[in-house]
Amino acid sequence: MPDINTSWIEAADLPLIIAGPCSAETEEQLTDVSKQLYDQGIRIMRAGIWKPRTRPNSFEGVGSDALRWIDMIKQQLDVKFAIEVANPQHAELALKHDVDILWIGARSTVNPFTVQEIAEALAGTDKPILVKNPVNPDVALWMGAIERLLNQGITKIAAIHRGFSSFRESRYRNEPLWQLPIELKRNFPEIPMICDPSHIGGERSMIPSICQKALDLNYEGLMIEVHPDPDNAWSDAKQQITPESLLELRNKLTVRSSRIQDRKLLSKLEELRERINSIDHDLIETLATRKKVIEEIGRHKKENNITIFQLNRWKEIVETRPEWAKKENVSPELVEEIYKLIHAESIKVQTKILNEDMTDE
Ligand code: PEP
Ligand code: MN
């Protein structure tokens, strides 16, 4: 498999900003927003022209007409355009019209057949291809889509983090689950990561804090939905912002450095990291001590024929530990989550002891 080529993003000013409407609606709307964005220095526009909609009979994009509008705008302004392609026909048309950057949407990344077909239609292209995370929280699927592109000799690739659907109530439209893009980056350390705060938040007031968090996690770029008249947008009206709000947002964001050049800063950070290392050591030693006691409990239960799971004891643990945490000014939610894992592990350890003589074979 070839390596990911990051030259195109290294040449750009970071963070890379891709901005534009959820959907291209009319030639006037697209021209108007592109001009306003150009005036504030944005050089990569986004526009959905084929729209994947959850239910039929809603606006599904203006289709290939918008490719002509994009050509017209590019004749007037020195800008690049990014659009979504969801099947090989879209990919072929986009290449034919020399669209600069293409992205694979969240609903396509979930389907390996679709990704494979798109990858084959784009084989060998040197245009950057951006891969949105799949709608479901599955890093392997996200990686698989990137690998399918690499297998077709496509190397200018970046990932877009747009959040994940969830069955539980959430203040996000798509939960960010920040550990998933971090996991993708662990597997593909060189891949540029772009955050799409619009689809994560689903609501315009949430966009600034999501952008800042992404920058603090060292993302290389942001893709933000911007519309000249967001409230009347034909799709995703609640999450789009005006060009003025984008400018205000850009001025507010703090871009921190991931490279530490100052030696004094570096040694202070190293000293703090050393302290964290030693605390983590203690934590693990404490877990090991706890495990020894659990094994003793397991043997005791076995000798006396007592069940492993004792509802009342578990209730006591989930009630008291978060309370103790609160007193120490530690997040009770965090401690509850940690104890769920610790308790699951404790059951595993005891099960092994109680059923020592039962093997799987
Ligand atoms: C979009 O970018 O407008 C879009 C449809 O996004 P996603 O694929 O993330 O749902
Ligand atoms: Mn959208």
Image: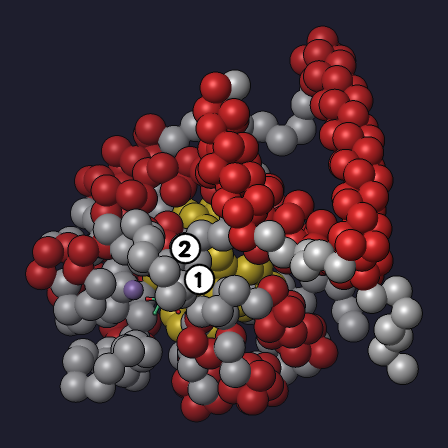
Would you say residue 183 is visible in this rendering? no
Q: Position of residue 88 (x, y in %)?
A: 48, 89
Lateral position of residue 315 relative to residue 223, left or right: right
Helix, strand or loop status at disc 1: loop
In the image, 20 versus 143, the foreground residue is: 143
Report the side of 14 relative to 203 (left or right): right
Q: Residue at x 52, y 39 (%)?
A: 316
Closer-to-camera residue (186/189): 186
Judge the density around disc 2: few (<14), some (14-19), many (≥20) Cα neighbours within 10 Å: many
Image mark for residue 175? 2
Classify 123 as above or below 27: below
One can see residue 120 in this view: yes
Relative to 32, does residue 140 appear above or below in the rendering? Answer: below
Q: Residue furthest front?
A: 304
246 left or right, relative to 358: left
Q: Which mark is residue 164?
A: 1
The answer to whether 94 appears left or right of 299 in the picture is: left
Mark 2 element type: loop
Identify the residue at the far left of this view.
232
Amino acid tagged 2: Glu
Residue at the location (31% across, 44% down)?
207
Do callouts 1 and 2 mark residues in contact (Cβ within 8 Å)? yes
Q: In terms of depth relative to the viewer, which is nearer, 325 or 208?
A: 325
